[in-house]
């Protein structure tokens, strides 16, 4: 099939990223992917037939992307379409899953694995097994809320019981759930523990990446949630070594937003770019475990980078999301630094640009070690050098608790030259390096 300049996506996986399944597209190298995405965590979490914890778009084949390359994904725009949503901290329901409530739900009455469900009424007992009628939800809220947005999607406000229950009666409409989505709308539960809380809206993608080289539940395509797959008692179990086949597409890093560029590893032919888990807002860490899942329209532009072999993603955040110490050195700062250098015999200053490496692991310490090592391996330098640079010209920031971080620092352009990224990074921050 001939590659297309723009591929439109409104089809979704069953929660499993499978490199053997046919991809959509192909999209041209340099072309666009436009997708209507489904809400992320909570809807799929209460929909047992979805086997991955999320409901992401079917992957798109990128023309010319071969194993060992990378794909730079520029987030051109993110637009929320949901009118309202619900979220909150979760509690798994024992006896309703096989090892993992995100991946292998079973009916506590008839024992059906991955059962189809019906919605009967509203509230936390509304999700019923289609075979026997039993309450089958694998999760309930410990503290939850329903939030509505203004028409411009600038702020959200949490709602009282009466309003939450009204929204619950027509959940798919209020959440603007895409037609081909099978998830149960989480607003059905009508949580209302927080009332009158105001939050600023700043949408981002919790899931954005490329397809792993083995079948993997989408929400577990990461070094922290992926730990639950190791020797698990269900069909998607992996060994510790097999977990390295992940691509870390599930990051929940709030800097993966409009204007940013994410550079992803290609571990299967065509890359298999997929999208999902859009959130209306989130502080660093997603500390509650979940945030405001919404439907939306996403426009991405993809570009193949030949021969850049990555284990996990590299992020180029928008300027205002860069740590203070990692922002490009201005002309005035360079002039001052040159004067200092001349006093002490420094003949030439480093030229540098910001870069952010994603690290994931079982916990934040392991994720930090992973991010430092990835940076060192890609740039062919030592971990101690990365540690020094991240300390004095950058920062380690939490993406998601328990185990996703970004290792950000000003990287010498001679290192970026060696991996072919200098022009991409320089162009991304051009307005701020020329000031």
Image (cartoon, rainbow, N blue to C red):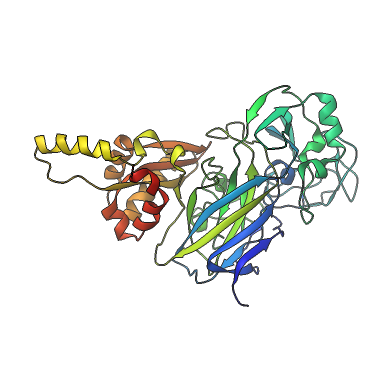
Residue nearest the observer in this picture, 242 or 367:
367
Q: For the point 68% across and 23% down, which residue is it?
A: 197
Q: Residue at x 61, y 77 (%)?
A: 2
Q: Position of residue 124 (x, y in %)?
A: 81, 34
From this view, report whether residue 178 is shown above or below residue 119.
below
Quadrant for the N terminus, please. Answer: bottom right
Whole-percent x and y of residue 382?
A: 27, 48
* Residue in front for this viewpoint, 265 or 205: 205
Residue found at the far front of this picture: 435
Point out residue 175 in the picture as x, y percentages from the top left corner: 76, 42
The answer to whether 49 is drawn above or below residue 307 in the figure is: above
Residue 237 visible in the picture: no
Q: Give the number of callouts.
A: 0
Q: Quadrant of residue 379?
A: bottom left
- Residue 212 visible in the shown view: yes
Asked whether 326 or 145 is in front, the reply is 326
Q: Is residue 37 above or below residue 337?
A: below
Q: At x 80% / y 40%, what residue is drawn?
A: 174
Instruction: Between residue 229 and residue 283, name the one nearer to us.
Output: 283
Image x and y of residue 122, in percent: 87, 35
User: Is 333 situated left or right of 4 in this image?
Assistant: left
Quarter that holds the C terminus: top left
């Amino acid at each position: 099939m001939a590659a297309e300049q723009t591929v439109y996506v409104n089809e979704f996986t069953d929660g499993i990223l499978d490199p053997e399944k046919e991809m959509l597209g192909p999209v041209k190298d340099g072309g666009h992917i436009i997708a209507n995405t489904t809400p992320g965590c909570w809807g799929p979490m209460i929909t047992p037939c979805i086997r991955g914890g999320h409901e992401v778009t079917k992957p798109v084949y990128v023309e010319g992307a071969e194993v060992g390359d990378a794909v730079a994904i520029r987030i051109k725009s993110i637009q929320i379409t949901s009118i309202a949503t619900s979220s909150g901290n979760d509690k798994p329901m024992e006896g309703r899953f096989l090892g993992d409530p995100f991946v292998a739900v079973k009916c506590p009455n008839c024992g059906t694995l991955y059962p189809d469900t019906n919605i009967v009424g509203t509230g936390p007992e509304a999700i019923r097994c289609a075979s026997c009628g039993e309450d089958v939800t694998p999760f309930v809220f410990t503290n939850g809320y329903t939030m509505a947005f203004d028409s411009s999607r600038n702020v959200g406000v949490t709602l009282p019981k009466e309003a939450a229950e009204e929204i619950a009666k027509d959940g798919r409409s209020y959440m603007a759930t895409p037609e081909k989505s099978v998830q149960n709308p989480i607003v059905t539960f009508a949580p209302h523990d927080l009332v009158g809380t105001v939050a600023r809206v700043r949408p981002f993608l919790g899931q954005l990446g490329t397809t792993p080289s083995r079948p993997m539940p989408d929400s577990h395509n990461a070094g922290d949630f992926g730990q639950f797959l190791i020797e698990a008692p269900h069909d998607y179990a992996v060994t510790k070594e097999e977990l390295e086949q992940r691509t870390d597409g599930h990051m929940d890093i709030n800097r993966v937003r409009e204007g940013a560029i994410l550079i992803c590893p290609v571990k299967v032919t065509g890359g298999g770019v997929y999208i999902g888990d859009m959130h209306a807002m989130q502080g660093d860490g997603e500390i509650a475990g979940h945030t405001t899942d919404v439907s939306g329209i996403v426009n991405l532009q993809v570009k193949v980078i030949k021969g850049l072999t990555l284990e996990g993603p590299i992020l180029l955040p928008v300027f205002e999301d860069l740590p203070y110490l990692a922002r490009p050195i201005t002309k005035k700062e360079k002039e001052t630094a040159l004067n200092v250098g001349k006093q002490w015999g420094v003949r030439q200053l480093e030229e540098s640009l910001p870069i952010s490496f994603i690290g994931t692991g079982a916990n934040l310490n392991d994720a930090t070690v992973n991010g430092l090592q990835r940076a060192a391996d890609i740039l062919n330098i030592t971990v101690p050098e990365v540690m020094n640079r991240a300390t004095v010209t950058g920062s380690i920031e939490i993406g998601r608790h328990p185990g996703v971080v970004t290792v950000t620092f000003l990287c010498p352009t001679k290192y970026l030259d060696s991996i072919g990224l200098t022009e991409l990074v320089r162009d991304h921050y051009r307005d701020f390096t020329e000031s």
